[in-house]
Amino acid sequence: MAGRHVPMTIDAARGFIRRQFATTVGSESIEAAAGLGRVVAGDLRANADLPRFNASAMDGYAVRTADLDGANLKILRVVGRSLAGHPAQMELGEGEAMRVLTGAVLPTGADRVLKQEDCVESNGWIAPSLPLSGRPHVRMKAEDVARGAVVIADGTRLGARHLALLGSLGIDLIRVHRPLRVALFSTGDEVSPGPVLGEGLIGDANRPMLWALLREFGCVVSDGGIIPDDQEQLTGILLAAAQDNDLMITTGGMSVGDEDHLTSVIRRRGFLEFWRLNVRPGKPVGFGDIDDCPVLGLPGNPIAAMVMFLMLGLPLIAQLSGERADYPKFLKLPMATALDKNAGWWEAIPARLCAGPGGNTCVEAVEKRGSAMLSSLVAADGFIILPEGTGPVTAGDEVDFLFLTGS
Ligand SMILES: Nc1nc2c(c(=O)[nH]1)N[C@H]1C(S)=C(S)[C@@H](COP(=O)(O)OP(=O)(O)OC[C@H]3O[C@@H](n4cnc5c(N)ncnc54)[C@H](O)[C@@H]3O)O[C@H]1N2
Ligand code: MOO
């Protein structure tokens, strides 16, 4: 573990978090409809085939390809109708067709649907456009999902698409991890809890920002408010919050972090490290464990807090929540313009997407870049990530881009 004043790489910090923690939340059964944002506990298997039956993918006529291949027959007799939700209980014989609508059960014997645009219908007979071409326009039973297959893997956080699949399968109860309970605090005498009236006071940017991010990642957040700059109060509040939460996140008060900052009580009840990371922004980060409750101390500057939340907080939350995902997720994109960079440290630069010379998507840094400048976050779509060892970049260079989550 790095000493207090030895800069640590972001990768070393992430590795430390990975090794230090495992899933801490148990599991429960809930209604699938209430599963948005929850993390699946155990592989979820299909209880049915999807599609459940061979079905028509178009409005038209179900036919037997063999009847029409090589144009053996020129016309077919329409012997019935199969509508979505109202199947016809009959088999299709030679020279027969059945009127079908999209989603209707395909009659036994049929292996193709002719779109109604491709047929002329008259007095119960159809004359298809021949020769046959294009797709058969049928959805075959189980071609999407076979009963018994794992459809949602253990550790998946459920989104709209997963709820669609569960709905389609008719699964109503699912086993998920209990949501992570996170206590969120700002610190600092200058941060005003209400209207910003006095000289030298500032509004609280970090708590609403982190509250929104935590909610987006399925956490149940308890708003701990603003802790004044007082060691005893800070200690008391953190010790109390450790009893009812799975994680505590604070912002501010990290650059002065050293062993005197928190009382010996905390040191007896766990550990708290103060890291100086080799990054811009977000150098000072606190990390530890109090009464078995992890603590993440983010820097006070809002951009630094955001970057360190995305880089360290998200992997920690995923790990504690049982989510199997590698956060944050980067995209490789080309630079639109050149950018100066010191190779000595890792840097996250607020940036936006823009159109490159050939109309391709590129990224460019926003104008204002201070780690306290919130207008840069609002102007940005994410961050250009340049690791240590990377110096200035030029237009066209591919870089890692970290999308800002939340809207
Ligand atoms: N002598 C040094 N001073 C500083 C260093 C350093 O290495 N040596 N590092 C700088 C860096 S980098 C950062 S980042 C900040 C981080 O400091 P802290 O985590 O201790 O945070 P504070 O000092 O409490 O606050 C920093 C800054 O952020 C503002 N702040 C705090 N909380 C909020 C909030 N909830 N909403 C909006 N803004 C907030 C606070 O007023 C300060 O302006 O330290 C540098 N200093
Ligand atoms: O963490 Mo500070 O400047 O790196 O915002």
Image (spheres, rainbow, N blue to C red):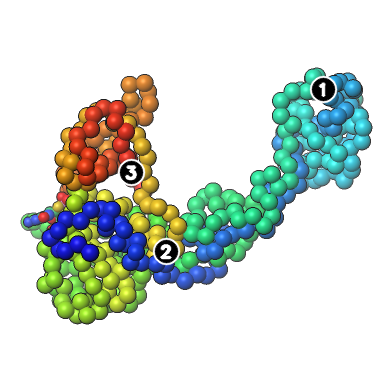
Looking at the rendered structure, the kind of residue marked 3 is Leu
Position in image of residue 90 (x %, y %): 89, 43
Q: Which residue is mark 1?
A: 128
Q: Residues within 10 Å of mark 2 (few under 14, many from 20)?
A: many
C-alpha separation, residue under disc 2 versus residue under disc 3: 22 Å
Label 2 element class: helix
Label 2 close to label 3 by CB (< 8 Å): no
Q: Which residue is mark 3?
A: 402
In the image, residue 293 sits, relative to residue 200, either above or below, namely below
**Relative to 397, 260 lies left or right:** left
Q: Residues within 10 Å of mark 1 (few under 14, many from 20)?
A: many
Q: Residues within 10 Å of mark 3 (few under 14, many from 20)?
A: many
Lower position in the chain sequence, tag 2 or tag 1: 1
Lower position in the chain sequence, tag 2 or tag 3: 2
Residue at 10 percent across and 58 percent down: it is 198
In the image, residue 148 sits, relative to residue 263, either above or below, namely above
Residue at 57 percent across and 63 percent down: it is 174
Asked if one can make out residue 193 in the rendered structure from this viewpoint, the answer is no
